[in-house]
Amino acid sequence: MNLEELRARHGEVFEITSGDITIYCVRPSRAAFMRYVARVQDRQKLLAACEDLVRDCAVHPTGQELEQLFERWPGATLTLAVKLAELAGAAEEARVKAL
């Protein structure tokens, strides 16, 4: 994995670490984030929604290597998805100001 190549190919790249897992990803697109929000509300689909968001955004590792990480540390996908949601602006605090 070459970080400069990832940047050249994808633009802005972020590193997210959860326990023993490190992924390099791009900020979630609007469509990817909307799919995640729609599915994450169903407890039966929570883990699948998180895995899909990570798959949508991961630029390294991808494919089988990413799937092996999901198998070994299935709970880490929850943490990774939360951080990706923050990159999409979900953690931003809103301010209200009377005008």
Image: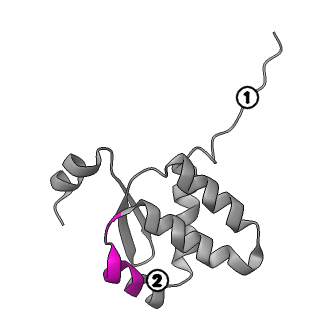
Q: Quadrant of residue 89?
A: top right
- Residue 2, position in %: x, y? 16, 61
Mark yes or no: residue 43 visible. yes
- Residue 9, position in %: x, y? 22, 50
**Residue shown at 53% from the left, 70% from the top:** 52
The numbered disc on residue 95 is 1
Mark 2 or 1: the one toward you: 2
The numbered disc on residue 70 is 2
Q: Is residue 53 above or below residue 99?
A: below
**Residue shown at 53% from the left, 58% from the top:** 83
The crowd level at tag 1 (other Cα within 10 Å; few <14, some 14-19, many 20+) is few
Element under label 2? helix
Between residue 38 and residue 21, name the one nearer to us: 38
Quarter of the image where the N terminus is located = bottom left
- Residue 46, position in %: x, y? 67, 74
Quarter of the image where the C terminus is located = top right
Q: Is residue 91 above or below residue 79?
A: above
Q: Is residue 79 above or below residue 72?
A: above
Q: Amino acid at mark 2?
A: Phe
